Amino acid sequence: MVLFDHLSPRSFLAFRPYLGTASGSESAQFREVQKALGLRGHAGSPVFVAFRAAMQARALTLEQTYRDPSAAGALYRVAEALVDISEEFWQLNAVHVQIAERTIGQRPGTGGTTGVAYLAEGLESARAFPELWDVRTRL
C-alpha cells in the first residue's frame, strides 16, 4: 500500500483503464482471508471456532481469559494475536479507503461500485473477531 500512497492521481488514472472491472473483492485469495476471518458473508470464522474450542477445553470464558491473563496463558496470547490480526486487517481496509479517495476522488470503483463510499461502508464490517472486541466492554 505504501507504493500507492505516493502515486499521484494522474499516474494512477494513466494505468487504471488496464484494470478493467477488476476489484480486490474478486480475488480468490482475498476471499479466503475474509472467510478465515469470518467477514463479508462468511459467518463464523473457522479460526475463532478453533480458538473457542480450545477455551472450552480449559473451561475458560473470554471474560476469565482477559481478567486473569496469567492463568489463561497461551490462550490469552492467542486472543491478543487475533485482535492484532483484526486490527491490521481493518487498518489495511482503512488505508485502502484513504488511497482510493486520494487517487480517484468520488469516481466509481473499478468493480462497478460507488468507489470510496462503498469502501468506507465496508469498514464497519471489516472488523474480525467481534467477540474479542466486545469483551473489553464487559471487563
Image (spheres, rainbow, N blue to C red):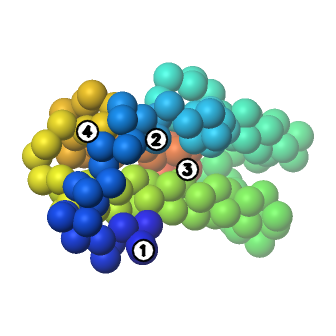
- Cα–Cα gap, marks 4 and 2: 11 Å
Q: Which mark is residue 2?
A: 1
* Amino acid type of the residue tagged 3 in the rendering: Leu
Circle 3 or circle 1, nearest the eye: 1
| Residue at left offset 39%, top offset 42% | 19
| Residue at left offset 44%, top offset 59% | 92
Towards the viewer: 66 or 80? 80
- Cα–Cα gap, marks 4 and 1: 20 Å
- Cα–Cα gap, marks 2 and 3: 26 Å
Towards the viewer: 95 or 7? 7
Residue 8 in picture, x, y percent from top left: 22, 70
Say which element carries label 2: helix
60 in relation to 25, above or below: below
Mark 2 / mark 3, whichever is N-terminal: 2
Marks 4 and 1 close (CB-CB < 8 Å)? no
* Amino acid type of the residue tagged 4 in the rendering: Gly
Residue 77 in picture, x, y percent from top left: 73, 66
* Amino acid type of the residue tagged 2 in the rendering: Gly
Circle 4 or circle 3, nearest the eye: 4
Mark 3 / mark 1, whichever is N-terminal: 1
Q: Please identify the quarter of the rendering in which residue 71 is found.
A: bottom right
Marks 3 and 1 close (CB-CB < 8 Å)? no
* Label 2: few (<14), some (14–19) or many (≥20) C-alpha neighbours in 10 Å: few
Q: Which residue is mark 3?
A: 132
Q: Which mark is residue 109?
A: 4
123 in relation to 1, above or below: above
Marks 1 and 2 close (CB-CB < 8 Å)? no
| Residue at left offset 31%, top offset 76% | 6
Q: Please identify the quarter of the rendering in which residue 85 is found.
A: bottom right
Residue 89 appears in the picture as rendered = yes
Mark 4 / mark 3, whichever is N-terminal: 4
